[in-house]
Amino acid sequence: MARIVLGVGGGIAAYKAVYLLRTLMAEGHFVTPILTESATKFVGQTTFSALASEPAKVSLFEDADPIPHTHLGRFADLICIAPATADIISKLANGVANDLLSATVMASRAQVVIAPAMHEEMWENFAVQKNVRVLLEAGYIIVPPSHGSLAAGDIGVGRMAEPDVVADFVRCTLASERVDLAGKKVVVSAGGTREAIDPVRFIGNRSSGKQGIAFAKVAACWGAEVVLVTANPSPEFPRVRQVVVTSAAEMSEAMHLERDRADLVVMAAAVSDFRVQTFSSTKIKREGRSRMTLELEANSDILASLAASELGCCLYVGFAAETDALEENLVKKLYSKGVDIIVGNDVTKPGAGFDTDTNSVTVLSKSGDRLTLEEVSKETVAVKVLALAYEMRERS
Ligand SMILES: Cc1cc2nc3c(=O)[nH]c(=O)nc-3n(C[C@H](O)[C@H](O)[C@H](O)COP(=O)(O)O)c2cc1C
């Protein structure tokens, strides 16, 4: 549980702050909303007061507390401003503290997460961009706005990130293990590959891609530029570029290409070990057959081939889904695949492995680190493993 000040600026996206407030409350945080005067023209103070941990605040001078900004600023573990207007961004970048929200940020040492929202022309304005750069340099976390529907039927860049995405940034920022990944490139593979038998059938596996997606999101929230090579497409996420593939061969080609200049490669995909030797270009018919045999041939081991051709600047994290002798198989894979970290899940355990939101894993590193995580969220697995990877980098 964290103490969060939720700042709301005066823009159309203020309604999204209501959803964000609900999410933060549902996650168990103590949330105090601060609305700017302009924000109250878009969504009523009463709505925020009714949903938050304490009444929403607006004024520096009319609160029961005679010095609200310092109390709120010191009280906060994190301040999240969503939507952040061009105006509030400018105030924060220039040290202006002439209302409760800007004064509270100025009077706080808490981490600040900013979700800008404005029309494309405003977002691209040189002054806004300059102010955003100032905030980034000062260590503020910016949740990039997306491209989509804006007010008055316009379409463009500047749309506030969806409330769930802002909540992801808040959670990842609050993680005590957080590492600053600004300027790093992280490549993650996710999902279950499919090997075509004929135009309508394939051999697949039960991987949902959730673990790989969790890695991509955490790395992006921590500032990395992420490439997600995935067999299971997922909704867009800021700073994550998706490369959608189908077969193991396509995944291999994409991973070799994207690995260029990568700082970290996480291979969380469930890659088919075998492919059909002869693909039938027409649908295989049942008539006249009581049985049929498919000849399979081995796919290349993507992780081993990536790690083997490594130039020494990139860390590799591999995953192993096992159904028996987990520990023994993990030690074998750590060395045979030449990776820095291996994460093993016993996919027979309830709440672990394929298509679950939780996972139970054993993590082993080349430097002798060992972690066990029992039925934790896939995001927590990503947080711990990314933190371990960068701790290893620091040590080396
Ligand atoms: C209908 C309407 C919508 C607006 N939407 C935005 C917006 O999305 N982003 C923004 O930066 N400003 C927007 N503005 C302008 C701000 O409300 C204005 O700059 C205000 O001074 C911001 O105050 P605040 O930063 O204290 O909330 C909008 C104004 C109006 C009238």
Image: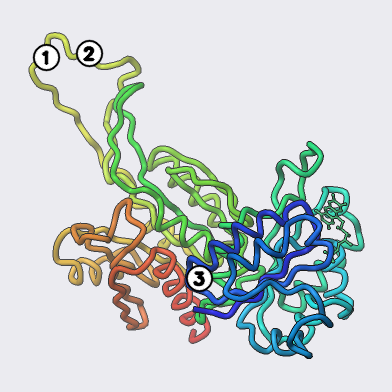
Q: Assess whether mark 1 and mark 3 are in contact (beta carbons under 8 angstroms).
A: no
Q: Which numbered dot is residue 277?
A: none
Instruction: Tell me what residue is drawn at x 42 percent, y 51 percent.
Output: 190
Secondary structure, mark 1, is loop
The answer to whether residue 243 is left or right of residue 109 is left
Q: Secondary structure at mark 3?
A: loop
- Residue at 14% x, 26% y: name it: 293
Residue visible at 83% across and 49% down in the picture: 119
User: For mark 2, what is the residue?
Assistant: 285
Q: Nearer the viewer, residue 308 or 114?
A: 114
Identify the residue position indicated by label 3 in the image: 312
Please say if 317 is above or below 68: above
Q: Position of residue 317 (x, y in %)?
A: 41, 66
Q: Nearer the viewer, mark 3 or mark 2?
A: 2
- Observer-nearest residue: 384 or 391? 384
Q: Which residue position is annotated with label 1?
A: 289
Query: Could you say which quadrant of the image residue 137 lies in?
Result: bottom right
Q: Earlier in the sequence, mark 3 or mark 2?
A: 2
